Amino acid sequence: MAEDVTADLGQDRSLLLVDDDEPFVKRLARAMERRGFVPETAESVAAGRAIAQARPPAYAVVDLRLEDGNGLDVVEALRERRPDCRIVVLTGYGAIATAVAAVKIGAIDYLSKPADANDVTNALLSKGEAMPAPPENPMSADRVRWEHIQRVYEMCDRNVSETARRLSMHRRTLQRILAKRSPK
């Protein structure tokens, strides 16, 4: 059941969702629309920047890693065109350094995937006075480990030998881990 947050939204309810995971972004757009937002979606840095230039929204949720570049480029474009835009950076590859970079250039919060519409809404509408509540369903230790391995694997351009070397792990062990599905 979607909660009604329209009183907290104000007059401008425009929301830009930038994520290259098409099913996820469509699901999130429908859920945010039920919460009173007026969502517009983009699936690339180029499309997100174009919307930011043409129709800068009041709110934005931007995935950090997109096929054509870094979501922080969209955050910068939004900040240039609309400094009061409330931006949440969303990513499956959570890292403290990235979170700090996102907040430094203007994001108000940073959420790790899988984040649901309630998490996103709470982050977009938070006033920032109090510490956020801990997540109801935090990632398991196995999932955090798997996410880290995937991040390093991507940074090494999907080279198993180089990834294994950087993680101080045997190559065959890494191959077994990569062959399995992600843990919950």
Image: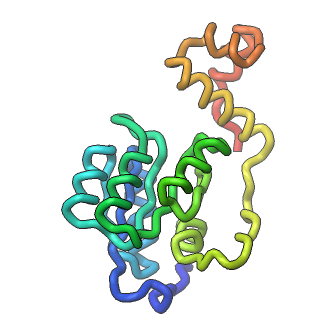
Q: Residue furthest bottom?
A: 7
- Residue lying furthest left: 54
User: What residue is at 41 percent from the left and 81 percent from the top?
Assistant: 36
Total tally of numbered discs in the picture: 0
Comparing 51 with 27, the one in front is: 51
Q: What is the quadrant of residue 69 in the picture?
A: top left
Quadrant in which the N terminus appears: bottom right
Q: Position of residue 49 (x, y in %)?
A: 28, 51
Does 135 sit above or below residue 164? below
Question: Outermost residue, right direction?
Answer: 141
Q: Residue at x 70, y 8 (%)?
A: 171
User: Where residue 84 sits: x, y (%)?
Assistant: 41, 72
Residue 149 appears in the figure: yes
Write the residue at 60% across / 56% down.
111
Q: Is residue 133 above or below residue 92?
A: below
Residue 177: quarter of image: top right
> Residue 17: x percent and y percent?
38, 59
Examine the image and state in which quarter residue 103 appears: bottom right
160 vs 145, left or right, is: left
Residue at (72, 77) in percent of width and height = 130
Left or right relative to 49: residue 90: right
Which quarter of the figure is the C terminus placed in?
A: top right
**Is residue 21 visible from the viewing direction of this image?**
no
Task: Specify how the rendered protein is coloured.
Answer: rainbow
**32 left or right of 163?**
left
Q: Is residue 150 left or right of residue 135?
A: left
Pinpoint residue 21: horizontal percent, then vertical percent. 42, 45
- Figure check: 170 above or below 32: above
